[in-house]
Image (cartoon, grey):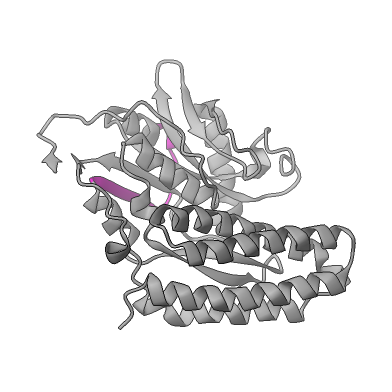
Amino acid sequence: MRMIKKGEKLMKAHFQIFNDIYINCKYHAILNMLNAFNVDVNVILYNYITIYKSSPQYNTYKPEYITTRNLQDILFENGILEEKIDYTLNLFEKIKECNRNDCCAIIRVDMYEIPYHKEYFKKKHYRRYVLLYDIDIEKGIVKILDREKNNIDSEFISVDFKQLSKWYNSYLKNFYFSKIDTDCTLYIFKQIYKNNSQVISNNNEFLFDITCYKTELYNNIKTLQEMYTKIKPDSYKTLKISLSKILLAKQADKYRFNKIGKSQCEEIIKQQMNMITVMLYYIEKNDMDKVKEQLKNFIELEEKFNFYFIKTCGRVK
């Protein structure tokens, strides 16, 4: 570990976009922020638990990712200081401050104002996280990373400050100030030291600690069973959304368990991914019986997965 001296800056690394997995826009931004500072993304990937939650607002079910320890602590242990800001009425000043201090930032935006998100542009308000990476004050532009789940080849997008402020202010108006979303709207990350230690990923030192989350993992089964009981022909659209999000979570889990050599868990995940693909096919065919049959098998595999996961990965008291 090397601490930063007063007046010294640790420059961001030549940026290589991390696209091996896509969990959601928030985690894609966080993982790539780590990549920008040349910090191993596995410090996050090895430290979260996937929890299935119902989303009554959208009548869907979605995975949530709960870090086994406080996210700010994990980042700080790896040389990254996170500053959370409720909101700002002058985004341009915050961007200039990031530029002076060689920081990365993640902001909340409203996809209603983003032209390249054609599904939402001027049609529907929807929340999103984007990563600000390379800021050019003289030209008045910032490079952002904003990957869509189906686009595996993310690229930086150059956006002028006025346009970016419009996206951010629309989020404030339609989500933050209206109390739909009260989380912070701006996150600034600064590298304060370089941590040269290797991420420990062998079986004995695997970083999951699920003592506090054992109940939540079993509750995943209850959530999936609830999904099963609510399957109806008129629910196919929302079921498709739910399964697509769970598939993203399983793709990430497959990547994680492959990295640490947990073959039993990885094999179950592969089977579940195939089942989701089959369910999505039968949804398109409006075959409710086949969908329910596959989901029932999926739940049985989830129970099996929890058994191996708790037995081999967690340090459970």
Residue 85 in the figure: left or right of residue 23: left
Residue 251 picture location, percent across and down: 57, 54
For the point 33% across and 52% down, the residue is 43
The quadrant of the rendering that contains the N terminus is top left
Displayed quadrant of residue 194: top left
Residue 193 in the figure: left or right of residue 230: left
User: Any magenta on residue 82?
Assistant: yes
The quadrant of the rendering that contains the C terminus is bottom left
Q: Which of the pair 29/285 is nearer the observer?
A: 285
Residue 92 picture location, percent across and down: 42, 32
Residue 151 in the figure: left or right of residue 158: right
For the point 45% across and 55% down, the residue is 256
User: Any magenta on residue 19?
Assistant: no
For the point 73% across and 38% down, the residue is 118
Please provide the residue range marked out in magenta.
79-92
Residue 78 picture location, percent across and down: 25, 48
